[in-house]
Amino acid sequence: MAGNPRAVRIAALIQRVVASALESQMHDKRLAGVTVTEVRVTNDLQIAKIYWTQLGRSGHEAGERKRAQQALRQASGRLRTLVGARAGLRLTPTLRFIYDEVPAEATEIEDVLTAARHRDEAMAKARVNASYAGDPDPYRHDDEEESDGSGSAPDEPAAEDTDEADR
């Protein structure tokens, strides 16, 4: 579709015609809340895939989607006639209706991101009054070794040990 500008123009025209027909001319209650999200036309202009979604009542989405799919299948002939009349094409593309899963998946992703954001906020609140489990700085520093009072580094043998070894 991206390579054929005519297919892109016809897809946009089909989307406008089908969306306005669903809104104003199709008086089927099963099509309430149906939205055309995208139309893709093959390069040979023979098939138009119409992606649609539906806003339904929570808990009833699956049943409403099946009824809307059936209504779209039944109305496809009339919608194809309308597209042919408006497009002025010699051959009107065959209309195939495909349920668009993207909006539902986007909602799920938004829910996951919201939950992650709440966990991050809870961790930020917990960090405000948090303190280290051990010493704030558990590592040894060179300046502490010099101040222990013996005057020699712990890795060097004492002067008495070297005298006995030389004998």
Image (cartoon, grey):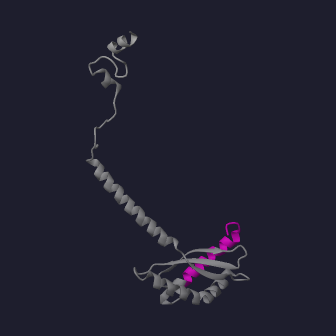
Look at the image and say whether residue 13 sits in the magenta stretch.
yes
List x then y, in percent, for residue 147.
Answer: 28, 21
Q: Is residue 123 above or below residue 48?
A: above
Taking the spot 73% from the left edge, 75% from the top edge, the residue there is 44
Identified at 34% across, 28% down, the residue is 141
- From this viewpoint, which residue is outermost toward the front? 167
Measuring from the top left, give residue 67's x and y in whole percent.
50, 87
Image quarter of residue 15: bottom right
**Residue 88 at least partly seen:** yes
- The chief SS type of the magenta part is helix
User: Where are the magenta residues, as a range?
Assistant: 1-21
- For the C terminus, the image quarter is top left
Drawn side of residue 3 relative to residue 98, left or right: right
In the rendered view, tell whether residue 124 sits above or below residue 138: below
Residue closest to the far top: 167
The N terminus lies in which quarter of the figure?
A: bottom right
Residue that appears at 72% across and 83% down? 91
Q: Position of residue 35 (x, y in %)?
A: 51, 78
Q: Is residue 148 above or below residue 113?
A: above
Answer yes or no: is residue 25 visible: no
Residue 3: in magenta span: yes
- Count of all numbered marks drawn on residues in the image: 0
Residue at figure coordinates x 45%, y 65% from the top left: 109
Which quadrant of the view contains residue 120?
bottom left
Report whether 65 appears left or right of 111: right
